[in-house]
Image: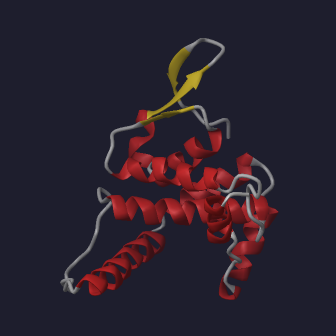
Amino acid sequence: MREREGFLAKMWDFKHPPECDAAFQDLRRMQSDKELWPHMTELLSNVDVINHVQDSCVASFIEMGGHQGWRVSNNFCPDREWLTFGARLTQFGYMCWKYARHGDEIPEPASPANPSYDMIYVAYMAICDGILTNDATLLNIAWACWPEKRDSLMKYDQSKNAVVPYKPSW
């Protein structure tokens, strides 16, 4: 494993917080896509989750801005069209998927860079009109995070050699 992959493996080697054990156990019980993705779609549109994502963005701006000597207004509130908001929402969605499918383990220990790059594509949904990919996990996370952009989620259908609207199987 190269140095970059080692760094990314450490980044994705996070355990669930003890205070979230009940939610973690619920996610671990969801073995099928028909259970997981509707649950994640509901979870990621929950007002408390959205508020948490916004608070997390504000905290990041305050922390990072403080390192640069910036002052951040108390009225600062990033919305869904901000890339930072997209990154935090996607990170939360990815963490739920990771916990459901891999528990506290690293999802792809041989190639931990892949989830990092996939998250960026989904985060860009905050500022772009759509996404085109053949990666079902990436499309499912985008579907759960961005319900208002579902008509713009496109998949490359290899059997038809064509781009088609994504419709989840679940």
In this view, 164 is above or below 60: above
Look at the image and tell me in which quarter the N terminus lies: bottom right
Look at the image and tell me in which quarter the C terminus lies: top right
Q: Give the camera-side residue of 80 and 158.
A: 158
Q: Give the camera-side residue of 163 and 38.
A: 163
Q: Determine the residue located farthest toward the top in the rendered image.
A: 160
Query: Which of the 4 quarters of the picture holds residue 24?
Result: bottom right
Which residue is rendered at x = 76% and y = 71% of the image? 104
Residue 43 in sight: no
Query: Which of the 4 quarters of the picture holds residue 58?
Result: bottom left
Whole-percent x, y for residue 98 in the image:
69, 61
Q: Determine the residue located farthest toward the front in the rendered image.
A: 2
Residue 139 in sight: yes
Whole-percent x, y for residue 140 in the image:
59, 45
Which residue is rendered at x = 71% and y = 52% of the image? 111
In this view, 4 is above or below 60: above
The color scheme shown is secondary structure
Is 166 on the left-hand or right-hand side of 5? left
Which residue is rendered at x = 19% and y = 81% of the image? 75
Q: Give the camera-side residue of 121 and 140.
A: 121
Is 159 on the left-hand or right-hand side of 156? right
Whole-percent x, y for residue 18 in the image:
70, 87
